[in-house]
Amino acid sequence: MYKTYKLKNNANVLLIPLQNTDSITTLIMYPVGSRYEPDKLQGVSHYIEHLMFKGTKKRKNTLTLTREIDRLGAYYNAFTGKEYTGYYIKTDKKFTKISLDILSDMLFESKFDPKEMEREKGPIVEELRMYKDNPIMNIDNIFEDLLFSGSYLGRDIGGTEKHVMSFKRKDTLDYKEKYYQPSNMYIVVAGNIDEKTEELIETYFGTQKDTKKPSESFKPFSFGPSVKKERLVVEHKKTDQVQMMLGYPGYKFNDNKNVILDVLNTILGGSMSSRLFIKIRERMGLAYTVRSDYDVFRDTGYTYVRAGLEPKNINKAIKAIKAEIEKLKEKGVTASELKDAKTHIRGSITLSLEDSASQANWYAKQFMFGSIDTPEMYLKKIEKVTNEQIMKVAQQTFKDTQMRVSIIGDVKKEDVIF
C-alpha cells in the first residue's frame, strides 16, 4: 500500500513499496506546463526541463552529470506536458542514495549558465522540427490546437522556434522560481524501499525552503468554434499516407465518466479485435493502424479516433468510423464484448505495472491532482461499468455538432466530407 506525507518544507512525498523487485524509481513532478506560460514565454517549461541537465554547482557540466548517471546503468530522463513537468531516475536499489543526490542537485542547484542556455536553444528547435516533420508525432498537436483553439491548452508544448530563440535568461529564471518551489514539488518513489528511504528523502529534498509562495494559477480552457467549417483543419504535406485524428470534447481528470470511456474505447478501437480495427482494417482494408482512446486534463478532456490512410480513403474512413459510433449510441455493446473488455483492461494494467517506473507513473499524476486510485481500486470501478452506462456516455460524448477532424497529408480541405 502506498504512503503519503509532507517533508518539513512542505514538499509532498508518495512512497510505493514493491516486493520482488531490485529497482527503485524516483520521479519528481511539478504542476507546471505549457498552459501556465505567458504569451511571450510559450515553450519555456520545456526549455527549463532541458536546462536541468546542463550542470550544477557540484557537477559542472552535462558530461559530468550524465556520466555519473550512466555509470549506474540507470534509466533517466525528463518530460514536459501541458500541466506538469517530470524528472526521473530508475536504478538498482543499492544506488538509491546517489540517484536522490543527483536529482536534488539538478533541481535545486542547476547553474543555468548563460552560454549553455543559448546553446540549448538549437537542439530544442531541432526537436520541434522533428515533430513537425513527422505526421504521426504531430497529429496530436494539430488536433488539440483545433479543439482548444484560442486557449492556452491548445498550444504546442514546445512553443515555436521564434519563441524559443527569444527566451531571455532573467525571464526564464523568474518563471522557474514562480513554480519550482519545494512546497510545489511532488516526490514519488516506487520499488524496493527500505527503512532508510524516508531518511534519504528528507536529507536530499527536505532542507530547501520556499523563496516565494508558488503560483497555482493557469489559464482556463475553452473549445474552439463549433461552426462546422471551423471544426476541420488540414495541414497539407506531401506524404504517401495521411494521418487523421477525429474527436469530441470529453471529461476532466477525476470525472467518473472516464472509467466508462476506458471500457467504451477498448471495445471501439482499443485492440486488434475491436470494432474499428475489424471494420476499418480487416474488412475494408483502409488502414494499417486505427485506434480510439481518450485524454484528460485538470478541467477538461477529449476522446478520439486515429488512423493512417491513403488520401483517397479519408471520406470512406470517416463515414465508417461515424457508423460504428452510431451503433454504440443506439445499441450499446454485447455482454461478451463488455466482459472481454474488462478482462483486457485488467490484463493490460497488470502487465504494464510490473516494474517500479510504471508504478511511479501510475500514481504520480493522481497524487499531484489530489485523487489517488490504486490499480485494484480502478479495476473495481471498471468491473461495475454497464452497457447502459456505455450507451449514455456515448450519446453524451459523440455529438456530430462537436466533432473535430484534423488531417496531415496530401489532401485538400474542400474534399473532406465529415
Image (spheres, grey):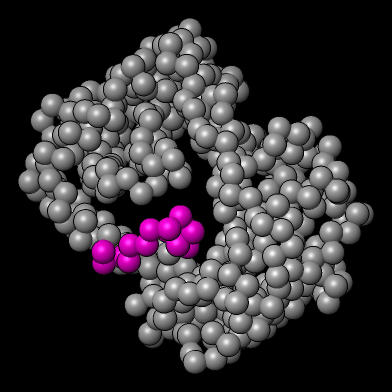
Give whichever of 80, 244 is nearer the camera. 80
Image quadrant where residue 51 sits:
bottom right
Magenta residues (range): 364-377
Q: Is residue 306 magenta?
A: no
Image quadrant where residue 113 sits:
bottom right
Coordinates of residue 333 in the picture (x, y in percent) = 13, 39
Coordinates of residue 365 in the picture (x, y in percent) = 47, 57
Image quadrant where residue 171 sits:
top right
In this view, the residue farthest toward the left is 335
Residue appearing at x 83%, y 77% in the figure: 58
Give whichever of 264, 208 is nearer the camera. 208
Coordinates of residue 211 in the picture (x, y in percent) = 74, 62
In the image, residue 58 above or below residue 404: below
Number of callouts in the render?
Answer: 0
Q: Is residue 6 left or right of residue 208?
A: left
For the question of whether residue 291 can be seen, the reply is: no
Q: Is residue 184 left or right of residue 373?
A: right
Give whichever of 173, 142 is nearer the camera. 173
In this view, the residue farthest toward the front is 213
Residue appearing at x 50%, y 81% in the figure: 23
In the picture, the quarter occupied by the N terminus is: bottom left
Q: Is residue 352 left or right of residue 68?
A: left
In the image, residue 221 above or below residue 196: above
Residue appearing at x 45%, y 45% in the figure: 298
Residue appearing at x 23%, y 42% in the figure: 264
For the question of whether residue 404 can be seen, the reply is: yes
In this view, the residue farthest toward the top is 414
Coordinates of residue 237 in the picture (x, y in percent) = 60, 23
In the picture, the quarter occupied by the C terminus is: top left
Q: Main SS type for the magenta part?
A: helix
In this view, the residue farthest toward the bottom is 195
